């Protein structure tokens, strides 16, 4: 396992630092506008926002996947363990210890569960015995996958596929795991199960996690610190337990009024036009 060392900034061990970045697609479409965030070593941080807020573009910028979408960081810097990585190649960034779970549960459907995991494990090139140990390590977090290891991935459930892609990321021993829209399209009980697994990975492996979510309940319940994105900007941030109590977050993202009753969709549309953080 890699030693868990980041770079020191005062008394805080900073693993990832995104500093005032702007991102453009095709050289003209400005998507991110001065985004800054920090992930400390061993922490779980979330980025919360509606569809189209720019959350996935942040993931692409950190992981180096912007190039495949004709995107580029045009201003600002991204540092991982003190190394500048903005506009770096995905292979270089992954080699530093950043593993990405993209939205959409991108399994290789014609391969079995274990074959999907073994592909990632094989990157380490440490022999068959070492790979077996790594698979057993993943199965210790995902006992359901051990039972399904010989099943073809195209025939397992969406929640099980999500477990496969998280397990595939875990097998590389990342310092930082980027998890994009973990809960999308999944039943609440499955989401809760996967969230508990991520919490377990964080506690036992000391893996930092940057969670990108539309589901505020999941994001704020799992994370320690959160950032709220709107229209390509960070508009609010703070400890997750404080964001949960923030009136704006409760009304717009959780759909709750001051007395705890659900607001109607019409009310939420009206509220979206008057969010105080956007002035």
Image (cartoon, rainbow, N blue to C red):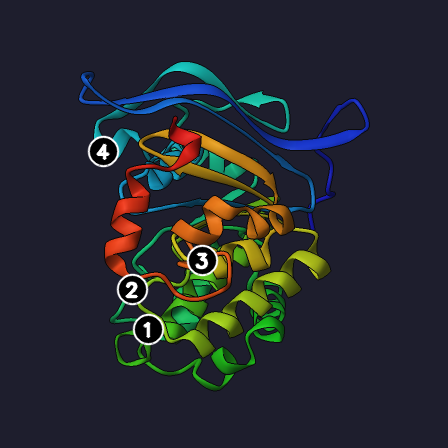
Q: Quadrant of the C terminus?
A: top left
Q: Is residue 230 above or below residue 246?
A: above
Q: Is residue 273 left or right of residue 42?
A: left
**In whole angstroms, how far apart are the C-alphas of marks 3 and 1?**
33 Å
Provide residue 206's location: percent of width, then percent of height: 70, 52
Structural crowding at the residue carrying mark 3, measured as other residues with C-alpha within 10 Å and reported as few (<14), some (14–19) or many (≥20): some
Residue tagged by mark 4? 69
Secondary structure of the residue carrying numbered label 2: loop
Residue tagged by mark 2? 108
Q: Tags 1 and 2 in contact by the CB under 8 Å rule?
A: no
Q: Tags 2 and 4 in contact by the CB under 8 Å rule?
A: no
Of tags 3 and 1, the one toward the viewer is 3
Q: Earlier in the sequence, mark 1 or mark 2?
A: 2
Picture residue at 31% right of the left edge, 79% below the top: 152
Residue in front for this viewpoint, 185 or 238: 238
Picture residue at 30% right of the left edge, 52% below the top: 268
Q: Tags 4 and 1 in contact by the CB under 8 Å rule?
A: no
Of tags 1 and 2, the one toward the viewer is 1
Of tags 4 and 3, the one toward the viewer is 3
Q: Is residue 45 above or below residue 258?
A: above
Residue tagged by mark 1? 158
Q: Earlier in the sequence, mark 4 or mark 3?
A: 4
Secondary structure of the residue carrying numbered label 4: helix
Q: Note whether residue 178 is visible.
A: no
Residue in front for this viewpoint, 94 or 194: 194
Where on the picture, by quarter, is residue 134? bottom right
Provide residue 166's location: percent of width, then percent of height: 47, 61
């Amino acid at each position: 396992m890699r030693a868990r060392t980041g770079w020191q900034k005062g008394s805080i061990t900073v693993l990832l630092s995104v500093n005032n970045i702007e991102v453009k697609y095709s050289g003209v479409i400005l998507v991110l506008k001065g985004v800054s965030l920090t992930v400390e070593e061993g922490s779980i941080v979330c980025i919360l926002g509606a569809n189209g807020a720019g959350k996935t573009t942040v993931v692409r910028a950190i992981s180096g996947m912007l190039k495949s979408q004709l995107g580029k960081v045009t201003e600002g810097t991204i540092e991982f363990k003190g190394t500048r990585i903005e506009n770096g190649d995905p292979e270089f960034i992954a080699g530093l210890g950043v593993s990405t779970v993209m939205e959409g549960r991108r399994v290789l459907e014609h391969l079995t569960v274990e074959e999907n995991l073994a592909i990632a494990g094989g990157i380490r090139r440490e022999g068959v015995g070492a790979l077996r140990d790594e698979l057993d390590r993943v199965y210790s977090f995902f006992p359901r996958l051990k039972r399904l290891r010989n099943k073809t991935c195209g025939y397992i459930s969406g929640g099980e596929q999500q477990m496969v892609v998280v397990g595939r990321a875990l097998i590389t021993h990342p310092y930082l795991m980027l998890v994009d829209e973990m809960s999308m399209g999944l039943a609440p009980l499955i989401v809760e199960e996967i969230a508990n697994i991520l919490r377990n990975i964080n506690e036992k492996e000391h893996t930092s996690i940057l969670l990108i979510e539309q589901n505020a309940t999941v994001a704020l319940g799992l994370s320690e610190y959160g950032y709220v994105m709107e229209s390509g900007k960070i508009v609010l941030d703070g400890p997750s337990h404080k964001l949960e109590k923030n009136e704006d977050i409760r009304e717009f993202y959780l759909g709750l009024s001051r007395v705890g009753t659900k607001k109607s969709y019409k009310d939420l549309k009206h509220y979206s036009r008057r969010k105080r953080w956007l002035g």
